[in-house]
Structure formats: C-alpha cells, structure tokens
C-alpha cells in the first residue's frame, strides 16, 4: 500500500475528529523545504477527498455499503483510494487487499455515478463537481498578492511582473493588492521569497485597510495592537500602512509617524515563532514586537501601551467563510447552517475579546473582523458589545482604565462606516436591535466577490477624523459614523451632532474614574477556531 495513502488517511481521520485544521495538521512545524512536495501532495489529496466525501459516500451506499464491508478495516484509507480511483488519478497506487476490493467494484461504482448524473438531469460527461454540495464546489478565485510597502512600491512590483509576461491588475479596494489570473503560481517567485510580495486573500486585507487605510490623524503618533496576530499577514499589513503614513506626510509628521509600533499578541509559542519569522523576513523587525501573552490577560494600563491608539482584533472564529478549506465547510454542514453550540461558545469568546479591546483607555479606533459568515459571530457580537458599552457609560465607567486622568477619556464608542465603496454591507439579524443604517456601517465579503467570506466592523471614539468613513485611502466617505445611542435605541435619537458629542465628552471628563469590571477570561474555554488562516499565504487556491 502506498505510504501517501496511509499518511492521507491519518490526516483525514484526525481532521474528521475535529482535533485540528487540515492546513495546521499538514504544514505546522514545516519551516524547511524537506518533504515540502510530499506535504503539498498530502494536503491536496485530503482536501479533495473531503470535498468529494458526500459523493463518495453516496456511491459506496449505492454499491451495497462498499466501505462498510467486513474486509475494509480502514475506512479513511478507503475514502482516499476511492477518490483517486474515481476522480483523481483514475487508478489506485500500490497494492494490497483494500485496493483489490475497491478495484473489483470499479465498474459498479462508475455505473452508480452515471445513474446519479442521470437522476440529476446531467449528461454522462458532466463534471463530478456538479454533484457536490454548493459549499464544496471549487471557487476559482484570482491569485491575490499584496505588495509589502515595507520592502517595495506597488508600481515597481507591478511593472516587474508585467515585464515577465504576467497579467496584473490593481485591486480597487486594497490599494497595494495586485490581482492575477487564477492558477498563477507565485510561491517560488523571487518577489515572494524576499518579502516584497505577500500572498494573501483579498478579504483578509480588509481588517488593516479598514483601520489604517483612510485618514490617520487620530493616531497622533501612537501605536497599534494586533490582538490575535499569528500567523502575521495582517500584522505586516498594519505595519506597512503605518510606514506608508510616515512616508506620505510632511517632514515633521513623518518623523513622528516613523515611531509607530505594532504590538502583536498570541498565546501560542509556536504560532508566535512563526509570526516572528514571517515579520522579520518581510521587513517588520523594529516595527513589530511579538508578545507571547493571552490578549484577554493584558493589563490595559500597562505603560507599554499608553500610546496605543488603534487595535486590530481578528479573533478565533468558526472559519465558515473560508470556502477553500473543505474541513471547515464540512464541519458547518454537520453542525447545521447556524453552526451549533460551537459558534455560541466562539461568539462569547469574541465578545470578551472585543470588550477588552474597547477598554484600552487611549484607543481611538478598533477593528473587529472574522472569517465567519454567521451573524452570531459578526453583527451579533458588535451589537452585544455596544449594549455593554452603553451600560458601562450609564454606570459612569466610560471604558476607562483605573487611575486615568480626565484628559484620557475620549467619549463613547460609535460605529464608523468602513470601506464605504465596498458594495456588500452588514445584515440585520432578528432581535439584534440594529437598523439597516447601522448594518450599513459594517462590511461583508462572499465568494461571489471572488474572495473568501469575511466580516469587518470599525469602532471609533473621540473627534471625527478627516478620513472617517473612507478606509480605502481615497474617495469621500458615505454616512460617517452612527452614534451608540442610535445603535441601541433603533434610531430614535438620530445621528450625533457635534454639540451633543461635545457635551457628552465634557460630562464624561468630569466623572471620577472607576475600575473596569473584571472581565472573565474565556480564551482557555473557547473551542478551537480559525486563527488567522482566512486566506493568508496559500490557502486561497489549495
């Protein structure tokens, strides 16, 4: 029996028991090139077996329970072999009793496949892809590659790729993102190897773009936190945008902005080591500080974070938006459209993390994002956070840390319309209390947009920034921010005007500072979710 089948069966078994993600299981700890080709083959074989598994199971059932027969001792190996026989190489490699058992039923299996196509009204030569569930069908996304502004300029990189005969376009939402045809392989390209190009899915770039892609006067020379940072692509994007801000201003402003810093948190030592390698290899050394710590355990009043003005929060999530990860969509299919109890637990963790981010006393902007399609993890978490923020304001806490001076209180949080030119906006979940206008502040992405599913919300407080409502580096904003009271009372009070905002700010500054309610750390209890694999690196077409 082929070693590749045994290894693929082992991976398939572990993934189906939900012990870890497919990509993590295959590629974790593989920093060198030794065995890289074999790992890629294993990943592809298991990925395709998972995609075709519902169809394989149906065909096996039509053949009298083929895989449940007494002489099939390892069903995972059987599924992998069946995929290769029917939809992969067209044959089974190696030898052994299991191969003989399956090959003996080859004609019966192909007859069952033809009958299934006929029952669906498909011609005999129709692709098997048309028999798969919608969520399992392959999406031919373009190849996205973000120019790393820490190492190169977009015009120069684009020109070099064109000179090599590649078809390249500039993305209309993320300024430094290049778009190439589906199937373009850049993994071994020199621009990727030296860190000038970073392979990253389009929607994965939305988080840093929403936080830092518009006006940046609110930063006031301050720092940024990436709360759940590994594997590091969003961290690098944030650092690059901060660097771009430093290069675009006047000399004095550039000198101040050059000190911008990104604190990158992750509680897993191996993941943080991966982040460090990626960031150092892409020009992030000196700009990014990796922090081995659970973000929920961070002291918001630590002097190290006194200059933090922006926070990027992309916490663990269900990963239900990642259509290129078959282990995730299969789990969604098994758990139902809503994701089940696991999503409820994830949403509780996400809310705790968001409230933590909103509690940093000097923060002015917070981006919350997920690679989930579930409203409970997206709009539901945003609405719950705003409700709790209002309750804290009513108790006089105001989101401040203990011992802060009055000048540090920037007022209540509000939603700001992020990436305003992006067409797909948030939704209004039943019972959330959000209005259509409020949902319009948020952003969603879907496979129909040629990218993985994604969600972004942008919170702001303090004076409106010159770029508020832009978030794409150019263009006028649409709709600006939505007040917290409007969010929580269904629009009865309308949008905040400047006088009302100033009055509330003055009142908040007069209140005595109180200790924040102690937040319950849910990180250790949170179920395993997607941690930054949302199209980063080479997820998008493998």
Image (cartoon, rainbow, N blue to C red):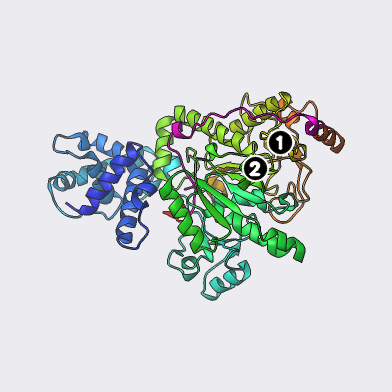
Residue 213 location, x and y as percent? 67, 54
For marks 1 and 2 on the same chain, the one whose residue lies earlier in the sequence: 2
Label disc, if present, on residue 76 of the rendered structure: none
* Magenta region, main secondary structure: loop
Q: Which residue is mark 1?
A: 413
The residue under the point 26% across, 34% down is: 61
Which residue is most to the bottom?
A: 163
Name the one closer to the observer, 78 or 107.
78
Q: Position of residue 505 (x, y in %)?
A: 80, 35
Query: Which quarter of the rendered picture does the C terminus lie within?
Result: bottom left
Specify the segment rendered in magenta.
507-536
The answer to which of 328 and 180 lies nearer the viewer is 328
Dot 2 corresponds to which residue? 366
Q: Position of residue 232 (x, y in %)?
A: 51, 53
In this view, the residue in front, 297 or 110, is 297
User: Quick one: SS at disc 1?
Assistant: loop
Viewer-proximal residue, 100 or 37?
37
Residue at x-position 69% and y-position 40%: 441
Q: Does residue 508 belong to the magenta stretch?
A: yes
């Amino acid at each position: 029996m082929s070693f590749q089948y045994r290894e693929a069966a082992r991976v398939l078994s572990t993934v189906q028991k939900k012990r870890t993600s497919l990509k993590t299981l295959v590629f974790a700890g593989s920093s060198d090139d030794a065995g890289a080709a074999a790992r890629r083959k294993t990943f592809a074989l298991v990925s395709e077996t998972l995609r075709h598994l519902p169809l394989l199971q149906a065909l096996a059932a039509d053949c009298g329970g083929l895989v449940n027969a007494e002489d099939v001792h390892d069903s995972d190996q059987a599924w992998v072999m069946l995929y290769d026989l029917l939809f992969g190489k067209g044959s089974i490699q190696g030898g052994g009793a299991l191969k003989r058992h399956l090959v003996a039923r080859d004609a019966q299996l192909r007859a069952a496949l033809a009958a299934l196509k006929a029952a669906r009204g498909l011609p005999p030569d129709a692709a098997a892809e048309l028999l798969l569930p919608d969520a399992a069908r392959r999406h031919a996304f373009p190849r996205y590659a973000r120019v790393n502004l820490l190492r190169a300029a977009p015009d120069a990189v684009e020109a070099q790729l064109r000179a090599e005969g590649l078809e390249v376009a500039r993305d209309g939402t993320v300024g430094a993102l290049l778009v190439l045809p589906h199937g373009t392989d850049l993994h071994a390209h020199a621009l990727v190897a030296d860190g000038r190009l970073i392979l990253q899915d389009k929607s994965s770039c939305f988080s840093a773009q929403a936080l830092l892609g518009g006006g940046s006067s609110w930063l006031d020379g301050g720092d940024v936190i990436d709360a759940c940072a590994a594997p590091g692509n969003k961290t690098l994007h944030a650092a690059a945008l901060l660097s771009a801000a430093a290069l675009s201003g006047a000399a004095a402003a550039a000198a101040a902005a050059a000190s911008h810093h990104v604190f990158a948190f992750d509680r897993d030592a191996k993941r943080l080591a991966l982040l460090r390698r990626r960031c150092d290899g892409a020009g992030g050394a000196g700009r990014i500080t990796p922090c081995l710590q659970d973000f929920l355990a961070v002291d918001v009043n630590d002097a190290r974070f006194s200059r933090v003005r922006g926070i990027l929060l992309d916490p663990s999530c269900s990963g239900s938006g990642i259509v290129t990860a078959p282990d995730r969509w299969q789990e969604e299919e098994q758990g139902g459209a809503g994701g089940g109890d696991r999503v409820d637990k994830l949403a509780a963790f996400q809310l705790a993390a968001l409230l933590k981010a909103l509690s940093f006393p000097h923060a002015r902007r917070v981006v919350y994002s997920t690679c989930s399609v579930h409203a409970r993890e997206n709009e539901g978490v945003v609405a719950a956070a705003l409700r709790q923020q209002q309750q804290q304001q009513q108790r006089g806490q105001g989101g401040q840390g203990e011992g802060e001076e009055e000048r540090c209180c920037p007022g209540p949080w509000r939603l700001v319309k992020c990436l305003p030119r992006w067409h797909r906006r948030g939704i209004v979940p039943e019972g959330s209390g959000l209005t259509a206008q409020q949902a319009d502040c948020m952003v969603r992405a879907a496979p129909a947009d040629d990218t993985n599913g994604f969600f972004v919300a942008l919170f702001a407080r303090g004076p409106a920034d010159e770029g508020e409502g832009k978030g794409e580096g150019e263009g006028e904003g649409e709709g600006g921010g939505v007040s917290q009271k409007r969010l929580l009372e269904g629009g009865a009070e309308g949008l905040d005007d400047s006088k009302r905002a100033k009055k509330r700010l003055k009142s908040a500054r007069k209140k005595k500072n109180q200790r924040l309610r102690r937040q319950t750390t849910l990180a250790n209890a949170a179920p395993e979710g997607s941690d930054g694999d949302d199209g980063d690196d080479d997820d998008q077409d493998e």
